[in-house]
Amino acid sequence: MPNHILEFPGGYTRSVGPVIGRFLSELRDGRLVGVKTQAGKVLFPPVEYDPANGHEVTGEFVEVGPVGTVETFSWVPEPLPAHPLDRPFAWALIRPDGADTAILHALDLGEFERGAKPPKRLKAGLRVRPEYRAERKGDITDIVAFRPEVSMITSPTRLEYDLQPGKALDRFFEAVAEGKILGHRCGVCDKVIVPMAGFCAKDGVPTTEEVEVADTGTVTTFAVNNLPDPRAPEVPFVSAYVLLDGADITLLTLVAGIPADQVRMGMRVKAAWKPREEWGPTLSNIRWFEPSGEPDVPFETIEEYL
């Protein structure tokens, strides 16, 4: 069967009447208006007759929205050339605040690859507002699409503070600047505390005896992190408690040089120091700890440090 095409060169011109004409004129000026029925309901978009009973509307116009609520929707993962957006979007019934009926329009949820599944935020009750074209002519396409209300933002946050380390930590950082890791030995329990703090938390006594410990150790426990950290080489990364050889207190540090899913309790590690010219009085002289290649230690030797 052959196709038949009916075309109006220059377009089909018709009168819109006072009700729809008022709606389109307000739309051109960036406003949404509805019209009241004799029963007091606000129809949006406005029509000449109340669809509930066929009575003429009152001619009383009411500004509505611009914010509205999604009542229902249909996701479009593969837009067609005739669609208003060239990326996945939703057709939605949107009821502006102050209106008793809804309009069907495009809902833009952002940038998605073609074929994408609907985002979790797309649901009935989502609050949205219209995005207008820069140049409007009095047509429903003056609204490019509705977009979600801004409900969350990410603000850059940075805190700077001066730390007064005290005599013990000051000495600890001084040693780290020389490539050494120092601890304090408790005179009561004989345990070596790293970083040294000037007292033993277990026995409550001052500590002064310095002990240099190795920059090798054993992973006692760890966590895999999936949020970016400027100190970490990649995501996911591992933060771990490492028991340095010669110490009796674990040190919280990063572990790298091995896939995150291969880090394990009892794994032997060594410090990965930055180049000597980058050293300063800070523990960040050690980028992270990485596998030393030694055999893992038995669990029994580290279980009291978990």
Image: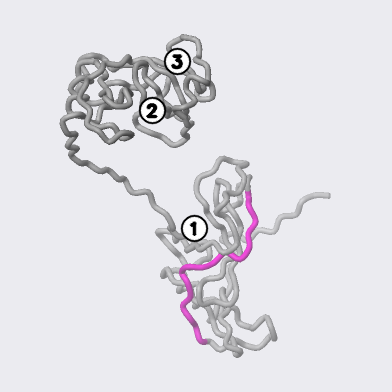
- Above or below, 273 against 10 in this view is above
200 over 78 or under it: above or below:
above
**Which color scheme does this rendered protein use?**
one colour
The quarter holding residue 179 reads top left
- Checking the image for residue 268, the label placed there is 3
Q: Which residues are magenta?
A: 60-76
Tell me the SS state at disc 3.
strand
Local packing at callout 3 (Cα closer than 10 Å; few below 14, some 14-19, many 20+) is many
Q: Which residue is mark 2?
A: 232
Q: CA distance from mark 1 to mark 2?
A: 36 Å
Asked whether disc 1 touches disc 2, contact meaning CB atoms under 8 Å apart, the reply is no
Which secondary structure lies at badge 2? loop
Distance from disc 1 to disc 3, alpha carbons, whole Å, reads 53 Å
- 74 on left or right of 238: right
Q: In the rendered image of this protein, does residue 6 appear above or below residue 247?
A: below
Give whichever of discs 1 and 2 has the lower sequence position. 1
Q: Could you tell me residue 288's position as x and y percent?
A: 36, 22
Q: Are marks 1 and 3 in contact (CB under 8 Å)?
A: no
Query: In the drawing, does residue 297 fall left or right of residue 231?
Result: right
Query: In the image shown, does 202 or 222 lie closer to the viewer?
Result: 202
Foreground residue among 146 and 292? 292
Q: Which residue is mark 1?
A: 147
Name the quadrant containing residue 53: bottom right
Q: Amino acid at mark 3?
A: Arg
As rendered, which of 282 and 191 lies closer to the eye?
Answer: 191
The residue at 44%/63% (across/down) is: 136
**x, y (%) of residue 266?**
49, 19
Is the stretch drawn in magenta largely helix, strand or loop? strand
| Residue positioned most to the front | 188
Instruction: Please report the residue visible at 49 percent of the width from the left and 83 percent of the height from the top.
Output: 61
Q: Secondary structure at mark 1?
A: strand
Kind of residue indicated by mark 1: Arg
